[in-house]
């Protein structure tokens, strides 16, 4: 960050969309902690920080009369924890814009934080409304975007607001910069061999990613539920495993494209199969192309664990998005854990590793290995779109 913050007010878009339990207690504060370097930088340089974020999906879960469920989605739940993390005085503003927000922003002292109410309480937020964005911009001298997790959304607080600050009055925060820098390490001139690991439930969610990856990776590992669409496309029997019938042709096209480009495509040779989608189901091991009727593949098997791990350990750059199995259930978490371990070992040995995408990030956190990964992204959908080569509106808006 290069701007001068002394005696300035900075409007900072953070991603404080943290999970809360039924008692409104934060259950994972990773996103809040990730924004602290930027907030502390502004405060310690004599500035004041006006923070804005969305929390949850208040528009989707309204009260019976259609009004916003303020008690559930208010940012007020975050105030105490924000004070603890930042060590600064935090004022809470129960609105995002309007008279009270203007007054509270004007009265804010250097070194203090003003936390605005949930941006999605305002109907203009998701529409990218200009009038709402302009009102937000009038609260501060400088705009800082540190919300990589929402950079793929053209919302008022993530994108439109940037147009009301000229160049020299807006910049990315540390988190945003490091997300972009680290993703670019994989995309631009990576050390080779470069291996991408893609897992998760559906091929359809990851088509663009797979297509793009085949253009520049050396090896592509495909695991998780999506692998069975590839297995079936190649003529295998997959029992009751997850399959997208309408994507069988696409799977064959991807296999052909990988061959054409000389990309080694690795699919799980074997699977942990279950007779039910349940934590206490009966389990067995089977060839992934020979799964009996009534059984389904819920994790990669021991041969696949070994093959995938060997490739990962031989790589110099590793990108991982999506779990290898239903890792939420212990019986089907071994594959994802083995991959997490292999990525950590490769990183110990000098490889660069980036894990992006909500579920693989929680798998890495759960395994306690996140400290041994070069970079764990905070942006699920945003990282996916960045890697797919799309322009993210929240980033583009800052360059205008
Ligand atoms: P995604 O959000 O696309 O990355 O998918 C993550 C989800 O895929 C997780 O909730 C996993 O439980 C699920 N998943 C992974 N492997 C399988 C599988 N073999 N069968 C069904 N679901 C799976």
Image (tube, rainbow, N blue to C red):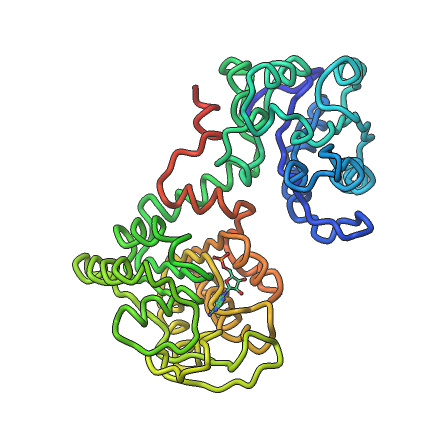
Along the viewing direction, whichever of 376 and 209 lies nearer the viewer: 209
> With 391 as the anchor, is 193 left or right in this view?
left
Judge whether residue 36 can be spotted in this image.
Answer: no
Q: Position of residue 210 (x, y in %)?
A: 33, 54
Residue 247 vertical position relative to residue 54 in the rendered view, above or below:
below
Quadrant, the N terminus: top right
Residue at x-position 26% and y-position 65%: 264
The mark total stands at: 0
Q: Position of residue 211 (x, y in %)?
A: 29, 51
Along the viewing direction, whichever of 294 and 37 lies nearer the viewer: 294
Residue at x-position 53% and y-position 69%: 326
Quadrant, the C terminus: top left
Q: Position of residue 348 (x, y in %)?
A: 49, 64
* Residue occupying the far front of the picture: 65
Task: Locate residue 95: give its quadrant.
Answer: top right
Task: Locate residue 118: give its quadrant.
Answer: top right
Q: Position of residue 250 (x, y in %)?
A: 27, 57
Residue at x-position 46% and y-position 61%: 200
Judge whether residue 115 can be spotted in this image.
Answer: yes
Residue at x-position 63% and y-position 26%: 123
Along the viewing direction, whichever of 18 and 216 lies nearer the viewer: 18
Residue 22 vertical position relative to residue 280 in the rendered view, above or below:
above
């Amino acid at each position: 960050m290069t701007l001068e913050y002394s005696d300035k007010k900075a409007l900072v878009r953070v991603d404080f969309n943290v999970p809360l339990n039924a008692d409104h207690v934060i259950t994972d504060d990773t996103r809040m902690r990730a924004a602290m370097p930027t907030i502390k930088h502004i405060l310690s340089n004599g500035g004041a920080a006006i923070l804005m974020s969305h929390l949850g999906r208040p528009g989707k879960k309204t009260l019976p009369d259609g009004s916003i469920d303020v008690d559930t989605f208010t940012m007020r739940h975050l105030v105490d924890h924000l004070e603890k993390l930042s060590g600064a005085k935090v004022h809470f503003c129960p609105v995002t814009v309007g008279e009270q927000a203007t007054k509270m922003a004007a009265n804010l002292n250097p070194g203090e934080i003003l936390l605005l109410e949930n941006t999605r309480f305002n109907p203009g937020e998701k529409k990218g409304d200009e009038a709402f964005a302009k009102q937000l911009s009038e609260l501060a001298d400088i705009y800082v975007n540190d919300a990589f997790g929402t950079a793929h959304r053209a919302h008022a607080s993530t994108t439109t607001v940037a147009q009301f600050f000229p160049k020299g009055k807006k910049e990315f925060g540390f988190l945003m910069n490091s997300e972009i820098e680290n993703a670019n390490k994989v995309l631009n001139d990576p050390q080779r061999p470069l291996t991408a690991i893609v897992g998760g439930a559906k091929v359809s969610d990851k088509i663009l990613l797979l297509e793009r990856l085949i253009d520049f990776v050396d090896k592509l590992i495909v695991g998780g539920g999506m692998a069975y669409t590839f297995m079936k496309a190649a003529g295998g029997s997959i029992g009751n495993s997850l399959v997208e019938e309408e994507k069988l042709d696409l799977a064959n096209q991807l296999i052909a494209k990988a061959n054409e480009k000389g990309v080694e495509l690795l699919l799980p040779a074997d699977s942990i199969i279950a007779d039910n989608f349940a934590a206490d189901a009966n389990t067995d091991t089977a060839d992934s192309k020979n799964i009996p009727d009534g059984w389904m593949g819920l994790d990669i098997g021991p041969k696949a664990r070994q093959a995938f791990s060997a490739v990962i350990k031989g790589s110099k750059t590793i990108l991982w998005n999506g779990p290898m199995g239903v890792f939420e259930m212990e019986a089907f978490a071994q594959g994802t854990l083995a991959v997490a371990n292999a990525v950590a070992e490769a990183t110990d040995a000098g490889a660069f590793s980036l894990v992006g995408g909500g579920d693989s990030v929680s798998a890495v956190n759960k395994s306690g290995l996140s400290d041994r990964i070069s970079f764990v992204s905070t942006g699920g959908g945003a990282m996916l779109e960045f890697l797919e080569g799309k322009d993210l509106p929240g980033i583009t808006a800052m360059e205008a």
